[in-house]
Image (spheres, rainbow, N blue to C red):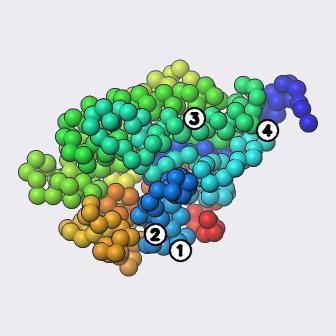
């Protein structure tokens, strides 16, 4: 049955009041890369009949799902813990569903994140001699989302209404823009020149989502890649890098990430000034994760935070020629005692720590728990493992 614009306006106002009263959200819209991909690259690989990525085989998914799901971990990701805390089901990958959403909201959410995705289009990297495997940049993900919106809403008012109780996650994204270049042999100094372009791409998408009607957005910074088993192996024995005595991490790489994060925060403050009616939440992935690198035993990572649980050997159990799940790789017996899962990605235990530090702790600006009080959140630990 068709409704008048006045009907939608009243409905939007009622739901907005309810949102501010409860402080919580009834759907999650996610964009990003492998830190948030819940199965999109898996589905894209199936549809394209290309070779299956290594993370579609055991031991990926072993801890919680007891089978590979397309997540680059042994279990749940941060987005899964967010959904659980809000009492939502696991957010489905966009490429694996046919969304049917009515005018009362964006269902319970949809995830557009794709493993390997970059913030910048592949053409940026090709022009610099870097090959990008995944053609699902942040801009492409936004276009997928806009196509979905156009199929379920015909007016600006309807589109804005769909966002009323949605928590929009933009990232983490940008890490692969740097990963692909560094792994291709680009110097840290050269890749540092990418940062303003990456930030511009993220900010552009944030602004477009706001124009579409997004009211609450979470934009994470990047993780401390200087602590990654991938880079610790890549630069192992090199006299070109220095290591932090307190953590063992590569100092220059972490300074690089801090530069990215600081520039991102500056741009987010500008958006806040222009759109005071929109809640812009910066998620400090860097310092939330750094807790474990500074004090791994304190957080239960008794096998340390630097060595990968699953990998191809070497001082950090990472070998670029032997990926986790391949016959020559080895996997640890107790992944919860490791922070790093496969060299670049983290264990479920690591993602749980980061989630709690962000969404139940003080590592977001403004603090998420003040917007969605802990008393309204559900305890982490009761998700269905059927997906």
Question: Considering the numbered disc 1 on the image, is that residue within a helix, a strand or a loop?
Answer: loop
Query: In this view of the protein, which residue sits in the foreground, 18 or 237?
Result: 237
Measure the C-alpha gap from mark 1 to mark 3: 33 Å
- Residue at the extreme left: 239
Q: Where is residue 70? Give x, y as percent.
A: 51, 60
Disc 4 from disc 3: Cα separation: 20 Å
Look at the numbered disc 2 and give the secondary structure of its residue.
Answer: loop
For the C terminus, the quadrant is bottom right
Q: In the visual, does 17 lie left or right of 379? A: right
Q: Residue at x 58, y 31 (%)?
A: 209
Looking at the rendering, in which quadrant would you find the N terminus? top right
Mark 2 or mark 3: whose residue is earlier in sequence: 2
Chain-order first, disc 4 or disc 3: 4
Residue situated furthest front in the rendering: 49
Q: Name the mark nearer the viewer: 1 or 2.
A: 2
- Which residue occupies the foreground of this view, 237 or 165? 237
Q: Which residue is mark 3?
A: 143
Which residue matches tag 4? 103
Which residue position holds label 1? 66
Q: CA distance from mark 2 to mark 4?
A: 39 Å
CB atoms at circles 4 and 1 under 8 Å apart? Answer: no
Q: Does 177 sit left or right of 369 as displayed?
A: left
Q: State the separation of the CA atoms marked 4 and 1.
A: 36 Å
């Amino acid at each position: 049955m068709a409704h008048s614009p006045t009907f939608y306006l009243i409905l939007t106002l009622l739901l907005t009041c309810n949102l501010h009263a409860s402080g919580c959200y009834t759907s999650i819209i996610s964009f990003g890369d492998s830190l948030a991909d819940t199965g999109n690259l898996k589905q894209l690989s199936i549809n394209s009949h290309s070779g299956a990525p290594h993370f579609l085989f055991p031991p990926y998914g072993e801890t919680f799902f007891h089978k590979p799901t397309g997540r680059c971990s042994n279990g749940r990701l941060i987005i899964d813990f967010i959904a659980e805390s809000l009492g939502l089901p696991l957010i489905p990958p966009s490429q694996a569903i046919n969304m049917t959403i009515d005018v009362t909201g964006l269902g319970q959410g949809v995830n557009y994140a794709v493993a390997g995705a970059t913030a910048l289009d592949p053409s940026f990297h090709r022009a610099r001699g870097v090959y990008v495997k995944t053609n699902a940049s942040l801009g492409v993900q936004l276009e997928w989302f806009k196509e979905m919106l156009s199929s379920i809403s015909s007016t600006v008012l309807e589109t804005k209404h769909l966002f009323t109780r949605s928590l929009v996650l933009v990232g983490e994204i940008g890490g692969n823009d740097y990963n692909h270049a560094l792994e291709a042999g680009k110097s840290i100094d050269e890749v540092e020149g990418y940062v303003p372009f990456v930030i511009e791409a993220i900010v552009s998408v944030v602004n477009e989502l706001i124009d579409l009607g997004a009211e609450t957005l979470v934009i994470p910074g990047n993780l401390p890649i200087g602590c990654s088993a991938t880079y610790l192996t890549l630069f192992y024995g090199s006299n070109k890098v220095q290591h932090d005595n307190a953590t063992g991490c590569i100092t220059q790489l972490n300074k690089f990430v801090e530069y990215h994060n600081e520039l991102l925060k500056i741009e987010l403050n500008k958006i806040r000034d222009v759109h005071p009616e929109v809640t812009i939440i910066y998620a400090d992935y860097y310092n939330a994760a750094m807790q474990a690198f500074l004090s791994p035993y304190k957080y239960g990572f008794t096998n340390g935070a630097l060595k990968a649980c699953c990998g191809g050997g070497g001082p950090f159990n990472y070998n670029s020629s032997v990926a986790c799940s391949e016959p020559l790789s080895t996997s640890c017996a107790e992944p919860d005692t490791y922070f790093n899962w496969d060299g670049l990605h983290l264990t479920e235990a690591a993602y749980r720590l980061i989630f709690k530090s962000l969404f139940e702790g003080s590592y977001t600006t403004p603090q998420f728990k003040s917007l969605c009080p802990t008393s309204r959140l559900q305890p982490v630990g009761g998700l269905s493992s059927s997906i």
